[in-house]
Image (cartoon, rainbow, N blue to C red):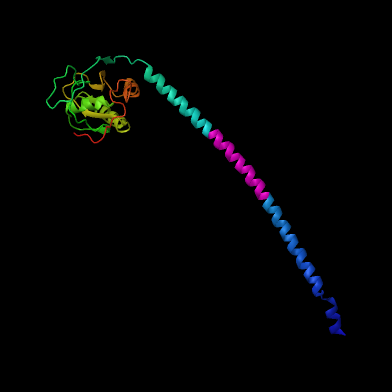
Amino acid sequence: MGSASKQGNKPSGKQAGLDRRARIAELRAVEQRRERRNKIIASVVGGALVVGAIATGTWIVVDANKDKKAKEVAAAAPIDGVQTFGDLSRNHVKEKVTYPQTPPVGGDHNAIWLDCMGHVYDQPVENERAVHSLEHGAVWVTYNGKATPDDVKALSDKVKATPYSLMSPYPDEKGTITLSAWSTQLVVDSASDPRVNDFFTKYVQGKQTQEPGASCTMGAM
């Protein structure tokens, strides 16, 4: 009898199957609710990211447009003390050229330019090759013994960060620091003069450039 009583307390095979199916259905329902919740979260997050991306993209475009506009305004503004020298010849020559400006700002020049993608030379360079670099839209920074080590360091850093520029010592120039572009020149006493940045903004590949986009690499010393 005791054995029969224990068997009576056990669920039948049919009942056990029903219980398993009910449990499986419950687990599936829980999983489906989790999936729906995750989809909703993903949708909300995705929407936020899209909105953020659009807002960020808009900000970048607006900021870029403002920066471009500011550069255009700066490039159009006159710079006090800048001298211009009109139309200059552009013939390729092999001989040395006697230039009216020191340093020169244009005229006949060597067929090979100087590398001018932010190149800083620690020795004087050939006028005729530097002039060719000016023809390509470079700004040439020169200095004499009056320039301080701080001036030279600041100018070197500026040139190294600026494609289409070059720098070299020029002991014979009258001014402490001279900035030259094609047919254009500015003399300053210090690298901290705000006109230095103005000159770079206006004349690096500026409107005075005779051959816009021409190479400033593969030249020579």
Query: Residue 71, how many percent across, how many down?
Result: 40, 23
Q: Is residue 149 visible?
A: no
| Residue drawn at point x = 75 percent, y = 64 percent | 23
Q: Is residue 55 magenta?
A: yes
Q: Quadrant of the C terminus?
A: top left
Direction from residue 21 to residue 176 in the image, left or right: left
Residue toward you, 123 or 106: 106
Query: Residue 3, how many percent across, how many down?
Result: 84, 84
Q: Quadrant of residue 87?
A: top left
Instruction: Name the magenta segment's main secondary structure.
Output: helix
Query: Residue 207, how many percent across, how many down?
Result: 33, 20
Q: Is residue 85 magenta?
A: no
Q: Quadrant of residue 140?
A: top left
Residue 82 drawn above or below residue 66? above
| Residue drawn at point x = 24 percent, y = 36 percent | 218
Residue furthest front in the image: 91
| Residue drawn at point x = 58 percent, y = 39 percent | 50
Direction from residue 37 to residue 209 in the image, left or right: left
Total numbered labels placed on residues in the image: 0
Q: Quadrant of the N terminus?
A: bottom right
Q: Is residue 34 visible?
A: yes
Q: Which residues are magenta?
A: 37-56
Query: Residue 215, how many percent across, how many down?
Result: 28, 32
Residue furthest left in the image: 95
Direction from residue 175 to residue 67 in the image, left or right: right
Q: Quadrant of residue 103?
A: top left
